[in-house]
Image (cartoon, helix red, strand yellow):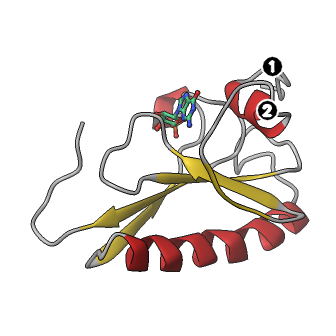
Amino acid sequence: MSYDSNNIFAKILRGEIPSHRVYEDDDAVAFMDVMPQANGHTLVIPKVPSRNILDADPATLARVIPVVQKVAIAAKEAFDADGVTVIQFNEPAAGQTVYHLHFHIIPRIEGVPLKP
Ligand code: 5GP
């Protein structure tokens, strides 16, 4: 499958639809998930388009992972979490619903399950 530049996250990147951005640099943007599975659920997306990790340029991955780490550390602190789930999905069979590479950063409190 190819990249569709009309996907929701591409529109968020272009500022065509609103988002609550919490971090941005030359390589990536982080914004709050509209349907959070826990308090502080944040998404990190690279600015360079790819559908998911399967077609991503390794150079893009090398630039986005430090942002994932930065946001994970900040979210753990901001939401006074005990841990952080970092997860991402590739293709519908794996649960992907928006086809621009993204990483979920989900602060976790001990014993509290994720919302479905
Ligand atoms: P996926 O299953 O593709 O990994 O997850 C896509 C995520 O994007 C979901 O957690 C969903 O809540 C989130 N999402 C979908 N549409 C929007 C939107 O318009 N704005 C924001 N901020 N998040 C969205």
Q: Nearer the viewer, residue 72 or 100?
A: 72
Q: Is residue 25 above or below residue 97?
A: below
**What residue sits 32% from the left and 54% below the top?**
39
Are the residues tagged 2 and 1 within 8 Å (C-beta)?
yes
User: Which residue is disc 1 drawn over?
Assistant: 6
Q: Is residue 31 above or below residue 105?
A: above
**What residue sits 69% from the left and 71% below the top?**
67
Confirm if mark 1 falls within 8 A of ligand 1. Answer: no
Q: Secondary structure at mark 1?
A: loop
User: Which residue is disc 2 drawn over?
Assistant: 10
Q: Secondary structure at mark 2?
A: helix
Could you say where residue 13 lies in the image, as x and y percent from the top left?
80, 39
- Residue type at mark 1? Asn
**What residue sits 42% from the left and 53% below the top?**
41
Res 112 label: none
**What residue sits 83% from the left and 26% below the top?**
2
Which quadrant is home to the C terminus? Answer: top left
Give how far apart the Cα atoms at labels 2 and 1 are.
6 Å
Query: Within the image, what quadrant is residue 76 found in?
Result: bottom left
Could you say where residue 36 lies in the image, as x and y percent from the top left?
37, 42
Q: Nearer the viewer, residue 100 or 16?
A: 16
- Residue type at mark 2? Ala
